[in-house]
Image (tube, grey):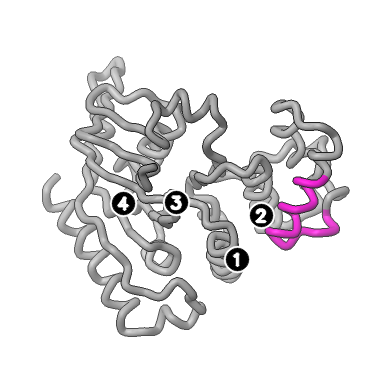
Amino acid sequence: MSDIVISAKDLGLTFQTGDGPIHALKDVNLDVRQGDFVSFIGPSGCGKTTFLRVMADLEQPTAGTITVNGTSPEEARRARAYGYVFQAAGLYPWRTIGGNIRLPLEIMGYSRDEQARRTADVLELVELGGFEKKYPWQLSGGMQQRASIARALAFDADLLLMDEPFGALDEIVRDHLNEQLLKLWDRTGKTICFVTHSIPEAVYLSTRIVVMSPRPGRIADVIESPLPRERPLDIRDSREFIEIAHRVRDGLRAGHGDD
């Protein structure tokens, strides 16, 4: 079996609008390997989120091809091959945290016992054990986002798609959740595709960093991280980390130069 989870070949997406076409993605070629943590970084409007939505079958490409686990994004979605974490936690305020996590499991027809087991397991995984009966409004923003991640993990898909999940949080909370996400990735071995605007976040989290140019979104650089899998926060002060961050910044500048 191939270890390529996502494969995009000459991928393009053009939106037709009343003011003319908008070229969101053009000539995107990328393979994401099993167990990778891939961050997508670039200026606003460069197609990062659009690319993630194409993977999830939420947008349809107008050129090229993309496969997820060797199948079309639609087939992958129907097979529940991925969990998706949005920018906002998106928790239903009238359901408890446990009820929010159980919702996709209810829809998928899991038994009550299996729902309870999976909910308890993922709450422990994101360090929210004991909060199952709380309501979203009783939790901080960071805790709500961890609950959102738990919901995406509940049906145990091997692929996790994350669209700037920590973008609205303050730096201290964000640092803590970055650490937790790395531990979670290490424990579960999942493949993660992660959209961010933050250079330090991209460098800290990723095995590979995909730098995207302004619209039409193209890949300006793909950086393989030499950092070890275990990364304390103070690795951000290391020479290697700073060098990678410089390369990301240079890629962002070069991409702007092509516009």
Q: Which residue is mark 4?
A: 42
Q: Is residue 33 above or below residue 129?
A: above
Q: Amino acid at mark 1?
A: Gln
Near-viewer residue (222 or 2): 2
Q: Nearer the viewer, mark 4 or mark 3?
A: 3
Query: Which residue lies at the image location 80% right of the left edge and 59% below the top edge?
Result: 129
User: Earlier along the polypeptide chain: callout 1 or callout 4?
Assistant: 4
Crowd band around label 4 with a 10 angstrom C-alpha radius: few (<14), some (14–19), many (20+): many
Measured Cα–Cα span from mark 1 to mark 3: 14 Å
Instruction: Tell me where the magenta segment starts and ends, as one range.
Output: 117-131
Of callouts 2 and 1, which one flags the residue occurring earlier in the amino acid sequence?
2
Q: Nearer the viewer, mark 1 or mark 4?
A: 1
Q: Which residue is mark 2?
A: 146
Task: Tell me which label, 4 or 3, sits earlier in the chain.
Answer: 4
Along the viewing direction, whichever of 4 and 163 lies nearer the viewer? 4
Are circles 3 and 2 on residues that touch, CB within 8 Å? no
Q: Which residue is mark 1?
A: 180
Identify the residue shown where x is 43% and y is 81%.
235
Q: Secondary structure at mark 1?
A: helix
Above or below, comparing residue 105 to residue 2 in the picture:
above
Structural distance between the alpha carbons of marks 3 and 2? 15 Å
Disc 3 designates what residue? 194
First in sequence, mark 1 or 3: give its number. Answer: 1
Measured from the top left, where is residue 199 in percent x and y?
Answer: 36, 64
- Dot 2 falls on a residue whose secondary structure is helix
Q: Secondary structure at mark 3?
A: strand
